[in-house]
Image (tube, rainbow, N blue to C red):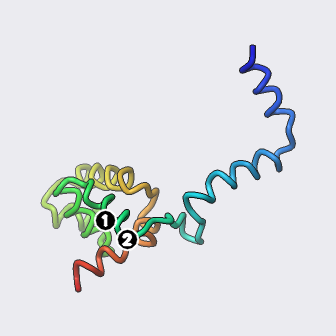
């Protein structure tokens, strides 16, 4: 019965109120850019996320971060396109990003550190 009452209460509120609550919750963790969300993580937190990747995912991560297409990444890794896509999906999930743009926005210094 309580659940039904809470649902009715939420539905009766104006949209602006519920969207303000949602914005407050999400703004703590990230901020939006034109290309996606920017995670508010320190360098050490980003390093920990990258360390959570398997060795093969790390290899794919640095290839993708280097700007190569998924097809080119598959060729460099000597795997099928579908396998490279699976690596990409796992990388996005573990690093908490949703696109290549977000990957680059949030983790480009990892690639710079590897080159330097």
Is 98 on the left-hand or right-hand side of 79?
right
Figure quadrant of the N terminus = top right
Residue bearing mark 2: 43
**What is the residue that sits farthest to the bottom in this orientation?**
116
Q: Position of residue 50 (x, y in %)?
A: 29, 61
Q: Position of residue 80 (x, y in %)?
A: 19, 53
Residue bearing mark 1: 47
Q: Nearer the viewer, residue 90 or 13?
A: 13
Is 96 on the left-hand or right-hand side of 66?
right
Pointer 2: residues within 10 angstroms few (<14), some, or many (20+)?
A: few
Figure quadrant of the C terminus = bottom left
Q: Nearer the viewer, residue 45 or 17?
A: 45
Is 68 on the left-hand or right-hand side of 77?
right
Residue occupying the point 12% across, 60% down = 78
Q: Position of residue 37 (x, y in %)?
A: 54, 64
Q: Position of residue 107 (x, y in %)?
A: 38, 70
- Secondary structure category for the residue under label 2: helix
Q: CA distance from mark 2 to mark 1?
A: 6 Å
- Secondary structure category for the residue under label 1: helix
Task: Please tell me in which quadrant of the rendered image residue 9 appears.
Answer: top right
Check contact, mark 2 vs mark 1: CB within 8 A. yes
**What is the residue that sits farthest to the left in this orientation?**
78
Task: Please tell me in which quadrant of the rendered image residue 96 appears.
Answer: bottom left
Residue occupying the point 72% across, 20% down = 3
Residue occupying the point 22% across, 61% down = 58
Residue occupying the point 27% across, 54% down = 52
Rendered view: 100 above or below 20: below
Task: Please tell me in which quadrant of the rendered image residue 24 appears.
Answer: bottom right
**So how many labels did they put on this image?**
2
Rendered view: 7 above or below 26: above
Per the rendering, the mark at residue 1 is none
**What is the residue that sits farthest to the top in this orientation?**
1
């Amino acid at each position: 019965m309580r659940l039904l009452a809470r649902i009715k209460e939420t539905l009766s509120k104006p949209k602006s109120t519920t969207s303000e609550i949602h914005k407050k919750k999400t703004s703590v963790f990230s901020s939006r850019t034109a290309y996606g969300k920017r995670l508010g993580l320190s360098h050490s937190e980003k390093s920990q996320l990258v360390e959570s990747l398997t060795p093969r995912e790390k290899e794919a991560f640095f290839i993708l971060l280097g700007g190569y297409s998924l097809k080119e990444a598959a060729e460099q890794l000597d795997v099928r396109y579908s396998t490279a896509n699976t690596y990409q999906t796992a990388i996005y999930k573990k690093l908490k990003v949703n696109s290549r743009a977000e990957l680059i926005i949030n983790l480009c210094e990892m690639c710079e550190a590897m080159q330097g």
